[in-house]
Structure formats: structure tokens, C-alpha cells
Amino acid sequence: MARADILVQFDLHGILPTPQRLEIAEILLAKPQHLSADQIIDRLRQSGSTVSKATVYNTLNLFGECGLVKELSLDPERRYYDSSTVPHHHFYNVDTGEVTDIDEDQVSFSALPPLPKGTESHGVEVVIKVRRYCAPLVRAGLAQLVEHIIRNDGVRCSSHLSGTISKSAARNNRGSDRGCRGTRDQ
Ligand SMILES: [Zn+2]
């Protein structure tokens, strides 16, 4: 988004422009995306900016409170800032931290509970948490799996996969096993 357009958005959302706020907004509003404060700080540093971490956090809080961006609390350790404020849903990959948009019309509800007394709906947002699927790892390690069954020295794959794989299979497939808790060497 061009600086002139950002200034219009600041005005619409009641945000006083400062050089630091403009720097941060230029990164976050460059395209539809979801960035954490740390990712924004990294990009600021890459561009030679000296904006302090505290200023970044304060500015992002301000942007969220004023409705310029949407805050996403998908992870207890990390808050994301969404440059798109139109209603939509998200996929959240718990292994990689990747956040992906889902169009609002791709999710429907057959029933919703009655609202608590004295409240009105402020919107419904769905987060579908995903993780890497284990099966390709097991397929790739089939030979080692057979070897493990014979030797009975394997480790157990994740909870959603009842099979076991050998330690050598896990080693051979390092990088593919992030979703498979327990496949790493102990
Ligand atoms: Zn989004």
C-alpha cells in the first residue's frame, strides 16, 4: 500500500501518523498477510530501521485497537496481525506457524448456540488447526518399518498414527517428521 493510501487509512481509523507508525504500516499493509511482531521487527532491521521493539509492540496494539489490522491469538506464545480486516477464517499450521486465509463463504454452520443474554454477535471466526500428515513418512520408511518389526527396536509415531517406525527411518526422513511427535531420536 502506498504511503498516501496508508495516511488515508490512518485518518479513517483515527491514528496520528508518525514516521515509526508509517514504517510499520508499510510493512504490514504491503499485501494480504499475517505477521507476528518479531517478523515485523526482522523486516524493519533488514531495511536498516532502528525502530525499537517496544515501539513496534505498542504500535501494533494501537493498530489492532483502532481496527486498522486484526489481531489473531492463534498461539499462546505469538500474536499475529492480519492486514485483512474483512470477515474470514484461518488455517493455522501448528508445526510451522503458517497462517492461511479461508474465505468466509467456505465455512457454514448448521447451528449456533443462543447468544448470552444482553449480547449481540460480533462475528464468528473459525481457526482450523492443521499439522503435517505422517503417512508419507511411514510409506517412505516402509522397508525400515519391516526391519523394526523384526527387531522390535522402534519408536512410536504420533497419536493419530498407530504404526511404529524405526529410528533409522526417522533419521532418513528428517525434515518430513515435524508432525510426528516421538519420531526424533531420543
Ligand atoms: Zn487472515
Image: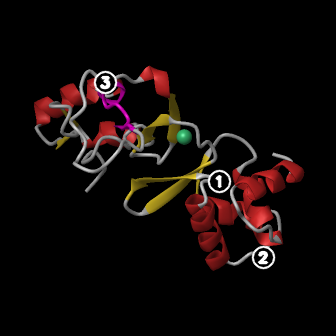
Q: Residue at x 25, y 42 (%)?
A: 115
Q: Nearer the viewer, residue 36 or 119?
A: 119
The reply to whether discs 3 and 2 touch (Cβ–Cβ < 8 Å) is: no
Give the spatial CA distance, label 3 vs label 1.
Answer: 28 Å
Q: Residue at x 31, y 31 (%)?
A: 134
Range of the magenta residues?
124-138
Q: Nearer the viewer, residue 22 or 113?
A: 113
Disc 1 on helix, strand or loop?
loop
**Compared to 146, does 73 lie above or below?**
below
Q: Residue furthest right?
A: 4
Disc 3 on helix, strand or loop?
loop
Task: Characterize the local packing of mark 1: few (<14), some (14-19) or many (20 or more) Cα atoms within 10 angstroms.
Answer: many
Give the spatial CA distance, label 3 vs label 2.
Answer: 46 Å
Disc number for residue 50: 2
Residue type for callout 1? Leu
Q: Point out residue 158 in the picture as x, y percentages from the top left corner.
A: 22, 40
In the drawing, does residue 170 fall left or right of residue 9? Answer: left
Residue 46 seen: no
Which of the two discs, 3 and 2, sits closer to the camera? 3
Reading the chain from its start, which is encountered first: label 3 or label 2?
Answer: 2
Q: Residue at x 76, y 46 (%)?
A: 30
Q: Residue at x 45, y 21 (%)?
A: 106
Disc number for residue 68: 1
Occupied quadrant, residue 33: top right
Could you tell me which quadrant the C terminus lies in?
Answer: bottom left
Ligand 1 quarter of the rendering: top right
Disc number for residue 109: 3
